């Protein structure tokens, strides 16, 4: 395809930093660049602690362990999300309770969460779709009244904010993704953001195979040992070096993506005004990061025709998740609370257009021209 859906981000200093790791013979986890990345996110977001992980999946698994999720517990989340959101809790023996989404943002409908709470509910997992925040004030209020943990799936939300607060820092834990499809990438990777300082030591122990190795390397103890259950969630410092070069130009990357997003929106607004398609909604108080630009066709049939038309014109457009409650594993491990008014219907209409750092204004114009041509 001449116009790919995604091109992984790359910063010029990446290879220089990776070479430095190799020359210094420090390529395992928690090296100099891992520390730099953690500190960058702590300073940028204001979180008490950031810990790079091997993936956002592992960050969510780590959050589930820290939240003490166990067999038979219930965890409320949207069905319109990636499988990792549910997998992290299913692995603990918990039951995902799926709630319908809002059609405007594709986020969990905060007004439906409280009705899904039972005496077995232990956590709420809001997913900030497309880097646009869920209604966190309402969610945090529900969690406080029912004494529930909040674990933000902010995989798509790096550099996004809700009422001045970085996504991933509002709940007890936040989970970022640095997969190659994300705004900032280390190939495979993620991060856990920790709001409360009392959770930091336990997080370090679980992340380091259940040992107090982190304290040893800080000189707080003279040897380290096995003190709790855990696993290996440390990415290679090579991956962190690749990521850090992008963080140094994070504002440049973010501005370029916002420019493309805004250009899409402006170009396609006439089609929205004429009723041919729908465009994304950014609620008041939300600052998004242009993670994706999607449009909504009338139905699945029209979306399929549009995607095929764009493909014939060298443009790769794709749809997104199949709702989890309709999948075999979703039926086996979870349940849907209430009515599926929007989750399935809206997911079948949505098509994502090419969006990546390096996409040129003239590329956006061409893609929009082809979308307009289809609707003519």
Image (cartoon, rainbow, N blue to C red):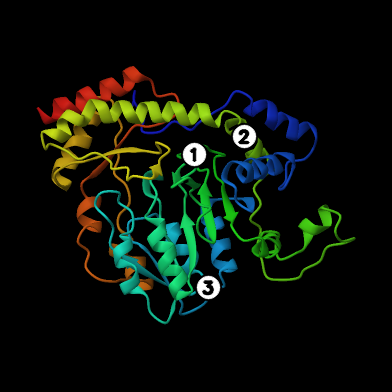
> How far is mark 2 from mark 1, CA to CA?
11 Å
Residue ID at (31%, 73%): 115
Q: Quadrant of residue 186?
A: top right
Classed neighbour count for the residue bearing mark 1: other residues with Cα under 10 Å, few (<14), some (14–19), many (≥20): some
135 vs 229: above or below: above
294 vs 230: above or below: above
Q: Nearer the viewer, mark 3 or mark 2?
A: 3
- Confirm whether residue 156 shows in the render: no
> How far is mark 1 from mark 3, CA to CA?
29 Å
Classed neighbour count for the residue bearing mark 2: other residues with Cα under 10 Å, few (<14), some (14–19), many (≥20): many
Sequence order check, earlier mark of 2 and 1: 1
Measuring from the top left, give residue 119's x and y in whole percent: 42, 82
**Are the two marked residues, 3 and 2, in contact with CB atoms closer than 8 angstroms?**
no
Kindly identify which residue carries mark 3: 69
110 vs 37: above or below: below
Residue 242 numbered mark, or none: 2
Q: Nearer the viewer, mark 1 or mark 3?
A: 3
Q: Quadrant of residue 37?
A: top right
Task: Determine whether the residue tagged by mark 3 lies in a helix, strand or loop.
Answer: loop
Measuring from the top left, give residue 121's x and y in whole percent: 43, 76
> How far is mark 3 from mark 2, CA to CA?
33 Å
Residue ID at (59%, 34%): 247
Task: Determine whether the residue tagged by mark 2 lies in a helix, strand or loop.
Answer: helix
């Amino acid at each position: 395809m001449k116009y790919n859906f995604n091109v992984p981000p790359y910063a010029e200093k990446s290879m220089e930093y990776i070479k430095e790791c190799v020359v210094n013979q420090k390529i395992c986890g928690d090296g100099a660049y891992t520390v730099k990345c953690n500190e960058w996110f702590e300073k940028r977001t204001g979180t008490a602690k950031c810990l790079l992980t091997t993936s956002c999946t592992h960050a969510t698994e780590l959050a589930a362990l820290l939240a003490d999720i166990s067999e038979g517990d219930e965890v409320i989340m949207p069905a319109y999300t990636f499988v990792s959101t549910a997998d992290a809790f299913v692995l603990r023996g918990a039951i995902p309770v799926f709630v319908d989404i809002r059609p405007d943002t594709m986020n969990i409908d905060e007004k439906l969460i409280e009705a899904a709470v039972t005496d077995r509910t232990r956590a709420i997992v809001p997913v900030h779709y497309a880097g646009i925040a869920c209604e966190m004030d309402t969610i945090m209020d529900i969690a406080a009244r029912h004494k529930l943990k909040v674990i933000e799936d902010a995989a798509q939300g790096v550099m996004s904010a809700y009422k001045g607060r970085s996504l991933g820092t509002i709940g007890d834990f936040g989970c970022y993704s640095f997969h190659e499809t994300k705004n900032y990438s280390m190939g495979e990777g993620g991060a856990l953001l920790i709001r409360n300082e009392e959770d930091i030591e336990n997080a370090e122990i679980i992340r380091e195979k259940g040992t107090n190795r982190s304290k040893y390397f800080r000189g707080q103890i003279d040897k380290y040992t096995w003190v709790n259950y855990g696993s290996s969630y440390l990415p290679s410092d090579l991956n962190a070096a690749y990521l850090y070069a992008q963080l140094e130009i994070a504002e440049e990357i973010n501005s370029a993506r916002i420019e493309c997003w805004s250009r899409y929106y402006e170009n396609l607004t006439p089609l929205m005004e004429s009723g041919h398609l729908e465009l994304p909604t950014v609620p008041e108080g939300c600052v998004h990061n242009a993670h994706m630009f999607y449009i909504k066709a009338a139905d699945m049939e029209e979306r399929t025709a549009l995607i095929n038309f764009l493909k014939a014109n060298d443009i790769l457009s794709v749809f997104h998740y199949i709702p989890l409650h309709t999948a075999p594993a979703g039926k086996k491990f979870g349940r849907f609370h209430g009515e599926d008014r929007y989750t399935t219907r809206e997911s079948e209409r949505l098509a994502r257009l090419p969006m990546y750092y390096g996409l040129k204004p003239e590329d956006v114009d061409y893609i929009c021209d082809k979308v307009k041509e289809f609707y003519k």
